[in-house]
Image (tube, coloured by chain):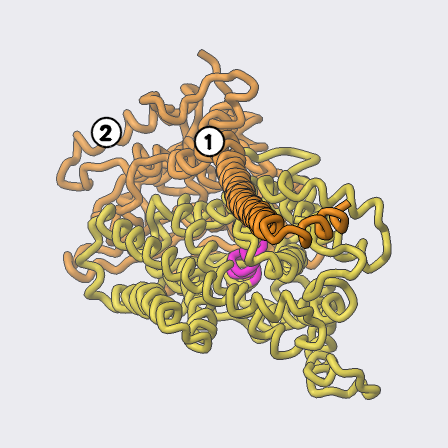
Amino acid sequence: MSDDATTTKSYFTPFNIIAGIIVIIGLFITALRFTKGLGAVTNLSDYNPWGIWIGFDLLVGVALAAGGYVTSAAVYIFGMKRYHSAVRPAILTGFLGYALVVAALNYDVGRPWRLPYPFIVQQGTTSLLFEVAACVALYLTVLFIEFSPAAMEWLGLKRARSVVVKLTLLLTIFGVILSTLHQSSLGALFLIAPAKLHPLWYSPYLPVFFFVSSIIAGLSMVIFESTLSHRYFAAKMDEAHKKEKDTVTLGFGKAASLVLSGYFIIKVIGISEGNHWHLLGTSYGLWFLVEIFGFVALPCFLFAIGVREKKLNLIKWTAVWTVLGIIVNRFNICLVAFNWHLPSSERYFPHWMEIGISVFLVTVGLIVYRFIVTRMPILYAHPDYPEEH
Amino acid sequence: MSITRRKFLGWLGAAGLSTTVGTAVDAASNKQFKGYAEGSGVLFDNTRCIGCRKCEEGCNKVNELPLPERSFDDLSVLENRRRTTAKTYTVVNRYEQVSSSKAPAYRKIQCNHCLEPACASACFVRAFTKNKNGAVTYDASVCVGCRYCMIACPFEIPTYEYDRAFTPRVMKCTMCYPRISKDLLPGCVEACPTEALTFGKRVDLIRIGRERIRRFPERYVDHIYGEYEMGGTSWLYISGVPFKEVGMREDLGITPAPKLTSGALSGVPIVVGLWPVLLTGIYAINKRKEKIELQDKQQAVADALAKANAEAESKLKEAMEKSKKEKEAAIEKAVSKALEEAAKAQSEETADAQAGEATKEASEEDA
């Protein structure tokens, strides 16, 4: 990847070779999926109708794409203009993230060509999934519009750009509303199954947990992405980005620490509400404790230290750890603690081809991200459009 | 009051959306839906069941499902725990009663046809319908295949045709909806040789169940499973052994599934209504803060400038005054000097006049 920033002539960089192999395997599995059906490539069963394409691609994907709404809200609504350089990369990753979520859903649902049915044929408004679908569809559109000025600057569409830029505040507010709704609804999907989800993870507060943790995911992802971008795309960055890099890391680390502390508290309230203290002594309880101490309390503490001591590397690694924590949480709810009552023989473990598709989609995301940041004004301000804020 | 199932579920869930069209919201009320009065159901009495699998065979036949690998006469399949599959709407499982050394007990599994079905509430295209005759039916022509119904069903009934690439369907018992609509018995009920299955109106079945329990209290557990579980189901069960011992969950509670999500759904319109106010409010506060800051800054600059100006002016004034004074002083000095000189000259004159001749010469010079 780093070779790419400088102009090399060879296409056979390590990144390209690995990505190429993954894409070929991915296309092969894709062909299998759409000609032989879900049964041929997944370990899904009648007991386990949702696997990692929902647990990872949908739940984790949407949470990790929260950087878009978190950053744009911070800058445009809360007026934290010192993070302005973080907006475009965050919007871009958000947009790509949601696009990949929708792509993954096409693999997961039985008849993907019917995905518009809930909107155009019959509306199942009693379903939380309807809310998720509606908000994701709308938000993907919002993110596309929010991202479009970068593409328009690249293509030289001045007039269209100036129209879209005027909508910034409106789009940001709309984006925050939609994100609040579907981030929380993803948690609320499981409210209907108290009999299947372990009581330590089942809570009437699930929607709140999902929403609050999505903010944490968004903040951590922005730190993580900016670290990666500075490593691989430094040549594409302007002075503002380089200068604001540490400001973003410190500021977002501070915010993440704060939100994590609130999240820890409401998780504890969740156990109290259900009075499930006695379950903490079971093996599931231990795993729950690992989650809330190892992946919530610990990063909260580490972020705080990193910010106070100005240890940027500590903040960056904590962000990676927190992202991992979000994955652990979503996997716990969708896969690990779901169907906990079933004998182990009936439990789900992903087929390698399911993992293959998830890896394939993430790789496609990386390739598209690289394509865009090496061409469009994402990591630098376009010379024709100096910052107008 | 006639409300359709669809409407009812719609109200329950889309509490917020319905406010926009002005219909009443029942989600938070204390109303209890007790099922359609004329709704049918089936009562399964496991003390009469002999595990012959005739019901499975009858179901397979009337629903035109593919024949299983092992014939329905093969009772050795009862040794395994089986569940409904995409090719089997109903199965019977045998449970050895180890603790009580009673005869084995049987359990028949199929869709329970909930009064307020979780699957119907969870479906985002409304593919499921709770019919007035009690059957919960599925419409494959709109199904997207998200399988949320399978997540939602507390009885783990719906199954999926994972092997079909282009037309996979959710598969489950329909209570033989086409047959009962024609006043025929469901396939399983018709096939049962021991009358372990009774088809009828749900209200009557509850009465029959209670009557059996009353007449043979030593034979039955005093509970009709399905009367209240998950808000009530159209299929009802009475048993000679605790329901837990035949694998039926006793921890499901009596809350109908749609109630579990109605709270979260009712939050939607609140967010839609309040977030714009909150967010534009925060934006406005920040803008105002910025504006005030800017004004303060400008004011400070203006003040500083004014102060500097005033200072400069006063200094200038001082300097001017000083220079004026100096000038005056200089003039005075010059004048006094001149006067002095004049006086001196005069005194010299008088001295000269006194000198006589010299005075004349001097006055001539002056002229």
Stretch in magenta: A57-69
Q: In which chain is the residue bearing label 1? A: B
Question: A68 or A343: which is nearer to us?
Answer: A68
Compute the Cα span from label 2 to label 1.
45 Å
> What's the colour of chain B in the image?
orange
* Residue A383: x %, y % from top left: 78, 61
Q: Amino acid at mark 2?
A: Arg
Q: Amino acid at mark 1?
A: Ile
Considering the whole magenta stretch, tell me its main secondary structure.
helix
Query: Is B41 on the left or on the right of A369, as rendered?
Result: left
Check if residue A355 falls in the magenta segment: no
To the question of a shared chain for discs 2 and 1, the answer is: yes
Query: Is B234 on the left or on the right of A241, as rendered?
Result: left
Q: Is residue A388 above or below residue A88?
A: above
Query: Judging from the image, what is the letter of the chain drawn in yellow?
Result: A
Looking at marks 2 and 1 on the same chain, the residue that comes earlier in the sequence is marked by: 2
Residue highlighted by disc 1: B270
Residue at 51%, 21% in the rendered image: B19
* Residue B207: x %, y % from top left: 28, 25
* Residue B20: x %, y % from top left: 55, 21
Quadrant housing the N terminus of chain A: bottom right
Q: Quadrant of residue B126?
A: top right
Question: B149 or A158: which is nearer to us?
Answer: A158
Query: Is A348 on the left or on the right of A115, as rendered?
Result: left
Q: In which chain is the residue bearing label 2? A: B
Residue at 68%, 71% in the rendered image: A237
Residue highlighted by disc 2: B210
Label of residue A111 in the image? none
Check if residue A58 falls in the magenta segment: yes
Q: What secondary structure is marked by label 1?
A: helix
